[in-house]
Amino acid sequence: MDGDWRGLDLSNPTEEHSMLRSMVRDFALEELEPQALEHDRDERFNLALFRKLGEMGLLGLTVPPEYGGAGMDATSVVIVNEELSYSDPGFCLAFLAHDQLFVNNLARSGSAEQKERILPKVCSGEWIGCLGMSEPDYGTDVLGMQTTAEQNSDGSWVINGRKMWITNGILDEDGTPADVVWLYARTGTDDKGRAQLTTFLVERGTEGYSAGQKIHDKLGMRASTTAELVFEDCVVPPENVVGTPGESMIHLMRNLEHERIGLAAMSVGIARRCLNDMNNYASEREAFGKQIRDFGQIQRHIGESWSEYRAMRAYVYDTARQIDLSEAGHRLDSDGVKLFATTAAKNIADRAIQVMGGYGYVGEYVVERMWRDAKLLEIGGGTLESHQKNITKDLSRDPTVIGE
């Protein structure tokens, strides 16, 4: 039997993937790690450092090279998210909002004119993008959103509404709004009475588009900004409509799979950091004349964390291997991997704090920040409850996948 298949590394399947990981790991340890505690404590987004990702070619990972991107795949996205999150998940969340929620969406669904005009700017880091979907009273219930867009006789659209919990919604301490927003708005109802959603590109400087409040005192992800965006009689030209009016659910569902694997990858980075730190501490710390790793209670925390980390890592990279960014079709596993990985990361962070005791409870020793950051991953990009619902629904439609 040919044994070459045993050499397959799901997390570094090609030399290009391995080189990417090495580059991002070096960046994270040399530049991201030293500033992480300060920016978390001060609730500040490191915009200057973020723009360096553009210089490294990382802000358009899945964008074709002719538009300034790297032309890479979902596995590459997972690699970058994992490595950034090992040092600073909050910074990585800003990257995800830009690269995966805005840039990839535009690369897959935008018109030739939209891509030619905007993609080079967002891939270089000249412009920072975000996605506007959640609202003050509507999150998971996407079809309940109240932001509306009405078309004028000249073809332009007037948008009114507010978006909430928007990562990258504000870029600095002066309240500068995102340079460009991938915005969902209601533009009518279908024959069944359901909301029809349309996608708009709203650029900074457009009259009626502004940033509202910056959200302070978040539990975690404090190194990225979260804000409200306001649209008051905001007039958008017809060339800034993405696709056909009413087809946003196609864009939304296709990119949700991409977003969820990205969030699961962040969980891998958090879990690896917490496992590494608790394992090292268990050798350094002594009690009753022994290293604490010799005690059964500590062995349980480390052993269970190692098993969960290895399981989540394999599931994340196997799912990424199968995802085709140009189409939907992997909801079952993009939901499944986020459901498992995000909760596992939070649990591993919790165990790390327990192993490290008082040191684990303070910011200087990182794991408490990882614990706080991990919680958002169970909420953003789809709640755990929504994943449970989707998985149950998909398995009822095709139970044969259980035996594949």
Image: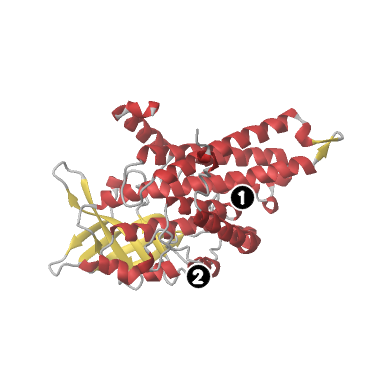
The outermost residue toward the front is 1
Residue 30 position by quadrant: bottom right
Mark sitting on residue 55: 2
Mark sitting on residue 273: none
In the foreground, 229 or 275: 275
Q: Which residue is mark 1?
A: 369
Q: Is residue 231 above or below residue 371?
A: below
Within-10-Å neighbours for mark 1: few <14, some 14–19, many 20+: many
Pair 1/2: label in front: 2
Q: Residue at x 34, y 69 (%)?
A: 118
Q: Residue at x 51, y 54 (%)?
A: 17
Q: Is residue 230 left or right of residue 12?
A: left
**C-beta proximity under 8 Å, tags 1 and 2:** no
SS under mark 2? helix
Asked whether residue 393 appears in the rendered view, the answer is yes
Q: Residue at x 51, y 52 (%)?
A: 79
Choose the circle earlier in sequence order: 1 or 2.
2
Q: Position of residue 230 (x, y in %)?
A: 35, 62
Q: Amino acid at mark 1?
A: Arg
SS under mark 1? helix
Q: Position of residue 31 (x, y in %)?
A: 62, 64
Residue 213 position by quadrant: bottom left
Asked whether residue 215 appears in the rendered view, the answer is no
Image quarter in which the C terminus is found: top left
